[in-house]
Image (cartoon, rainbow, N blue to C red):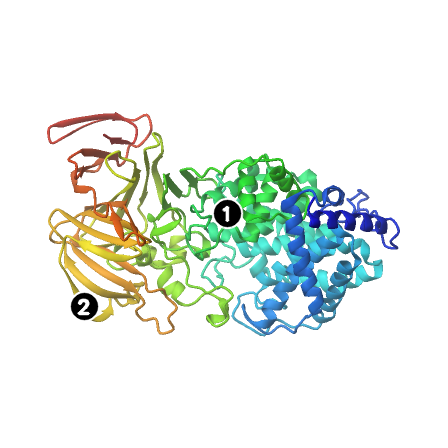
């Protein structure tokens, strides 16, 4: 037994003795709903009275739980030592008052847990004293002085953060509920909690009465405090929205999204609408991660207090299913792919994912793969679900969480496009053919990103925001998020005539989605995703097919990229590849610019410097680069009429809000129907220790489009060893049972299914 384990055992014996002699016992009170139904004793939401008993009985014997408890105790003890600070609100994100109130909500929640687990009255007193300080402050507060938000809070500059506060503080209140006198509870509920819940709901319907991650937090906040107080009116408001309220369907939020276009609202609607049957959340993984905490915490509270709702079975169990989808939307290092507005570096080590993993394991099917993620996270929740995970790890039940190639449908019915992820060895390709993604969506139909062992090879830019860094626009979205990051040219997809998809108009883009042609990952050595987009540019259809192919002739799998364009008129097409690293070699001559000028004047082009230009070759153009001690080569089928543009982000950026990342842009002018075909190879390695390079050159000798019509596109890939493989994709009859026969240059090809490769 470790010294810490022994100390916990001794503390447990002492605190249990106090438990039965303390004047205010934590289990002494039994409450009833207004309708006479018996409710659970407090705590009852996330940490339950039953869970408290089970945790106390095992303290000192469950290592990951004990470590998590020790860390939380140290954090809270440090805050108690500093004293209570409840400043008058005045700052944006990252400012002193914002950070202080945010820290307080975490500390209150943790202190409440410590009171229940350790039965040490100092934690209950701390929570009580701080809540009373908030009661005294809140009843004096007008709206927050910062006016940027479409829905201003009182403690914070936006209602969203007020809702964050109440979700956490509701848990603290639940934990000390029986420590307080009836008079103290009435004071807090009358002057703090009910007015707080009203402000973020009935007083701010533009925030609350919608389907969005913002309103999910609002619904959960109102519902959580309603569950603690046994207030059925608040619980109903949380589940179903504000009764008999209709918002102007044309009004928009700060990000340009409609507040309530379809009239739906409430927690249940926020489960029904954004999640596909596969568990994909339409705003993308970054905001799914953010929304999962209120989704799962309120769902857990409903499960424990109102089991008759069967909330974890709602919409065929999509809440728990979504956690598997979210974990699959991360790279080899656990960082989420930055689809739509997404901050790079956000990962499943975030606290919201600790909640997601623990809740999913405890209330789901006890997937042992989740235990391996929890073990990596090296912490668990201090509640019933955290105990279940800790016991599973202690008993050695974990198995590796298997990330596989997966196609995640988008839309509430699963029929609004999706996201395909191809995985082969250490390589991952992410292909987005989804719906607009609410107001956080980008105009990037059929875009992709590419990773090797968790490192970006071809990047998705993500968002333009320095979250909670006050010096950068108060930690909020910067204007370049609209002028650059959301624009089509910021992504690895096709741009027509230097205009963004749907002219970057949310009103238009939100009406449409791309359509899956096919997704295949059997056999494992060749995995393919193919999708079409026919609305981004009226009169033009794009069909992109991407394959991750493992060939014994090459060191590593390679990407085959086919972008087929059919248009009713001649246009200019740009296809960028946002690579990372240092240029090594090209097989074409390029001319660098002595003076850097923007590539264009609008639609994101104004933010690109043109660094060099080249005329493409008449067969294949090759471009090799070096990054993170690895080598990469892009081989693309071109003609002498094509241009190659070397560009770099950063033009018209006086505040240096944008990263200075490079791009290679393939440009095809005055073209009606065309087909861009490229191969991306990952190959070789460099050792700075031995100063040696291995396999630093491309293994592709030739890439040729040998057939292209409405029905089929065929590509021949020849390696330097002389072997040639033929890939044929079906452009419009891609069912797994379809039988195909095709003659190309005197050779016959027959196959069943959406593609041929041999």
- Relative depth, front residue between 714 and 97: 97
On the question of residue 569 being in view, the answer is yes
Please give the label number shown on residue 356.
none
Q: Quadrant of residue 393?
A: top right
- Relative depth, front residue between 678 and 69: 69
- Relative depth, front residue between 159 and 121: 121
On the question of residue 572 being in view, the answer is no
Left-right relation of 491 to 248: left
**Relative image position of residue 419 (x, y in whole percent):** 40, 44
Task: Give the alpha-carbon distance from disc 2 to disc 1, as whole Å.
Answer: 46 Å
Q: Quadrant of the N terminus?
A: top right
- Residue neighbourhood size for the residue with mark 2, other residues' Cα within 10 Å, grouped as few (<14), some (14–19), many (≥20): few
**Relative image position of residue 157 (x, y in whole percent):** 57, 68
Dot 1 falls on a residue whose secondary structure is loop
Residue at the extreme front: 690
Q: Residue at x 85, y 54 (%)?
A: 24
- Label 2 belongs to which residue? 593
- Label 1 belongs to which residue? 274
> Is mark 2 in CB contact (under 8 Å) with mark 1?
no
Left-right relation of 236 to 668: right
- Relative depth, front residue between 78 and 574: 78
**Relative image position of residue 497 (x, y in whole percent):** 23, 58
Q: Residue at x 64, y 51 (%)?
A: 68
Q: Quadrant of the C terminus?
A: top left
Left-right relation of 353 to 47: left
Which is in the foreground here, disc 2 or disc 1? 2
């Amino acid at each position: 037994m470790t010294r810490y384990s022994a100390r916990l055992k001794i503390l447990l014996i002492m605190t249990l003795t106090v438990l039965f002699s303390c004047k205010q016992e934590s289990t002494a009170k039994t409450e009833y709903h207004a309708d006479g139904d018996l409710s659970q004793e407090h705590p009852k939401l996330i940490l339950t009275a039953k869970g408290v008993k089970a945790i106390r009985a095992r303290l000192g014997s469950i290592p990951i739980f004990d470590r998590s408890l020790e860390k939380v105790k140290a954090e809270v003890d440090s805050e108690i030592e500093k004293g209570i600070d409840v400043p008058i609100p005045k700052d944006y994100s990252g400012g002193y008052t914002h950070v202080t109130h945010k820290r307080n909500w975490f500390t209150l929640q943790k202190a409440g847990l410590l009171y229940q687990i350790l039965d040490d009255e100092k934690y209950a007193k701390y929570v009580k004293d701080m809540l009373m300080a908030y009661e005294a402050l809140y009843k004096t507060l007008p709206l927050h002085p910062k006016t940027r938000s479409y829905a201003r809070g009182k403690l914070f500059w936006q209602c969203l953060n007020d809702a964050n506060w109440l979700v956490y503080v509701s848990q603290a209140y639940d934990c000390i509920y029986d420590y307080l006198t009836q008079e103290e509870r009435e004071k807090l509920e009358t002057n703090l909690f009910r007015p707080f819940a009203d402000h973020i709901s009935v007083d701010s319907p533009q925030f609350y009465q919608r389907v969005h991650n913002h309103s999910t937090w609002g619904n959960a906040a109102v519902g959580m405090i309603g569950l603690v107080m046994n207030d059925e009116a608040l619980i109903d408001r949380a589940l179903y929205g504000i009764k008999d309220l209709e918002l102007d369907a044309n009004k928009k939020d700060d990000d340009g999204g409609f507040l309530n276009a379809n009239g739906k609202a409430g927690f249940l609607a926020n489960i029904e609408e954004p999640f596909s049957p596969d568990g994909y959340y339409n705003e993308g993984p970054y905001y799914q991660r953010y929304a999962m905490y209120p989704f799962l915490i309120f769902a857990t509270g409903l499960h424990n207090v109102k089991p008759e709702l069967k909330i974890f079975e709602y919409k065929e169990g999509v809440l728990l299913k979504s956690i598997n989808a979210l974990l699959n939307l991360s790279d080899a290092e656990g960082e989420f792919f930055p689809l739509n507005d997404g901050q790079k570096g956000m990962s499943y080590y975030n606290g919201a994912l600790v909640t997601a993993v623990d809740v999913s394991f405890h209330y789901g099917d006890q997937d042992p793969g989740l235990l391996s993620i929890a073990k990596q996270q090296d912490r668990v929740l201090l509640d019933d679900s955290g105990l279940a995970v800790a016991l599973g790890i202690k008993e050695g039940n974990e198995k590796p969480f298997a990330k596989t190639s997966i196609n995640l449908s988008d839309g509430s019915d699963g029929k609004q496009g999706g996201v395909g992820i191809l995985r082969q060895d250490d390589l991952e390709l992410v292909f987005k053919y989804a719906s607009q993604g609410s107001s956080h969506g980008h105009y990037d139909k059929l875009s992709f990103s590419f990773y090797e062992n968790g490192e970006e090879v071809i990047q998705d830019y993500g968002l333009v925001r320095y979250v909670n860094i006050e010096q950068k626009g108060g930690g909020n979205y910067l204007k370049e998020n609209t002028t650059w990051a959301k624009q089509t040219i910021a992504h690895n997809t096709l741009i027509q005539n230097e205009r963004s998809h749907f002219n970057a108009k949310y009103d238009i883009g939100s009406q449409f989605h791309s359509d899956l042609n096919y997704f295949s990952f059997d056999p494992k050595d060749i995995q393919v995703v193919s999708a079409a987009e026919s609305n981004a540019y009226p009169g033009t259809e794009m069909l992109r097919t991407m394959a991750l192919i493992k060939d014994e002739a090459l060191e590593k799998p390679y990407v085959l990229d086919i972008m087929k364009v059919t248009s009713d008129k001649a246009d200019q097409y740009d296809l960028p590849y946002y690579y990372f690293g240092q240029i090594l070699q090209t097989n074409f001559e390029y001319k660098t610019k002595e003076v850097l000028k923007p590539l264009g004047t609008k639609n994101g082009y104004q933010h690109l410097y043109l660094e060099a230009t080249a005329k493409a070759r008449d067969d294949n153009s090759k471009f090799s680069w070096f990054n993170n001690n690895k080598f990469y080569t892009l081989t693309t089928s071109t003609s002498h009429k094509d241009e190659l543009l070397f560009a770099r982000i950063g033009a018209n950026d006086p505040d240096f809000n944008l990263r200075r990342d490079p791009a290679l842009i393939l440009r095809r002018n005055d073209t009606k129907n065309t087909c861009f075909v490229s191969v991306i190879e990952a190959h070789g390695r460099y050792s700075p220790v031995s100063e040696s390079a291995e396999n630093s050159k491309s293994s592709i000798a030739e890439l040729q489009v040998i057939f292209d019509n409405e029905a089929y596109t065929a590509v021949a890939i020849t390696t330097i060893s002389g072997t040639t493989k033929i890939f044929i994709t079906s452009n419009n009859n891609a069912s797994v049972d379809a039988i195909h026969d095709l003659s190309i240059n005197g050779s016959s090809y027959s196959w069943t299914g959406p593609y041929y490769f041999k």
